[in-house]
Amino acid sequence: MATVSLCMIVKNEEDVLARCLESAADLVDEIIIVDTGSADRTREIAARFTEHVFDLPWRDDFSEARNAAFDRASMDYCLWLDADDVLLEPDREAFRKLKETLDPAVDVVMAPYHVGFDENGRVVHSYYRERLIRNGAGMRWEGAVHEAITPRGRIVYEDFAVSHRKTRPSDPDRNLRIYERQLSAGKELDPRQRFYYGRELYYHQRWEEALAVFEAFLSDGRGWVENDIDACRLCACCLEALDRPDEALAALFRTFAYDRPRAEICCEIGRWFFDRARYQQAVYWYGQALDCPRDDRRGGFVSPDCYGYLPCIQLCVCYSRLGEQGRAEAYNELAAACKPEAPAVIHNRAWFQTLKE
């Protein structure tokens, strides 16, 4: 059976750390916790689960801290979690079975990271992350923020998921501050970090600056295809915010130069036409979204609703406004098959019933 070191970095996590460790402690063989300057009860809570709690001065570098945790691991594999992550019971069982069957020649285990949920707890945003790394294989964390390990060697995909369950907002300016300090010090960002710098500018509604960063990232031609596609989508968002809608639509179509259509992009194009009451065109693109195969293992950000519920509920509205109530009702029922308790589905059912009375 494979042995696993859980490696974490923490700072002021007293509200969530116990929840995380309670979900994972009995699944792993060792827990390594690196504290980067907590001023609350984080260290006390960590000490209830492990004697391996270490201090590391914070230097605006998440990779440095994660590598410090990995460097102290002694088991076959390193598992990383954030303090506000949790393993739910079905995922705990899947992880337990994986430990029993994992081929020791595997270098990296990729697993889903569920980071967005609707009001009923359904996953609405997810992507695969490198979750288990073979200890001593020489792979290192890179990037001061939005840090990652580039997987290499023998890579397998497993289905146990980690759920990211925040209980409070984090510092919204932290990542942007780190990037801007790096740039002020003359550091050149690699393509992945440039993409994420653009995202931070976008989150701060600095549309022109974000657009310039994304355009430079795309022009460089060294980005990962999933980041290229998302950069085009975010360019479209910036252009819409700058009241340049035709250029926004062109940015969405630009994604097709990188790979086959994604349902997320087709839904965005459908929304563009829907917002302009061009319902026939919107119908076409929402229909295209339904025809897109979902492939979470490609590694990009996935919005599951775009592969079922969202295009169906939008097709319902489009057909209704086109006067085709029968088709509209049929698509509402398809949306209901995805999310039966959705308020829009329930509202639409009531409205269609009034048409029959």
Image (cartoon, grey):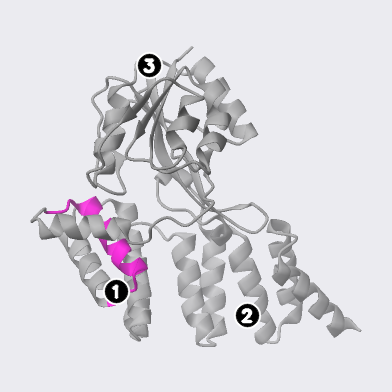
Sooner in the amino-acid sequence: mark 3 or mark 2: 3
Residue at position x 68%, y 57% from top? 338
Farthest top residue?
A: 1
Whole-angstrom CA distance, mark 3 to mark 2, is 54 Å
Query: Is residue 13 in sight in this rendering?
Result: yes
Q: Disc 3 on helix, strand or loop? A: loop
Query: Is residue 253 in sight in this rendering?
Result: no
- Asked if residue 196 lies in the magenta stretch, the reply is yes
Return the mark for residue 350: none
Farthest right residue?
A: 357
Q: Disc 1 on helix, strand or loop? A: loop
Front in this rendered view, residue 45 or 141: 45
Whole-angstrom CA distance, mark 1 to mark 3, is 44 Å
**What is the magenta segment's predominant secondary structure?**
helix
Q: Is residue 227 above or below residue 141?
A: below
Q: Is 122 on the left or on the right of 9, as rendered?
A: right
Q: Residue at label 3? A: 76
Q: Residue at label 2? A: 318
Sooner in the amino-acid sequence: mark 1 or mark 2: 1
Residue 255 image point, x, y percent: 34, 64
Q: Residue at label 1? A: 206
Q: Is 355 on the left or on the right of 237, as rendered?
A: right
Write down the region rendered in magenta: 188-207
Residue at position x 31%, y 49% from top? 146
Which label sits in the foreground, 3 or 2?
A: 3
Residue 192 image point, x, y percent: 25, 51
Front in this rendered view, residue 141 or 64: 64
Hey, which quadrant is residue 245 in on the image?
Answer: bottom left
- Asked if residue 105 lies in the magenta stretch, the reply is no
Q: Label 3 near label 1: C-beta < 8 Å? A: no
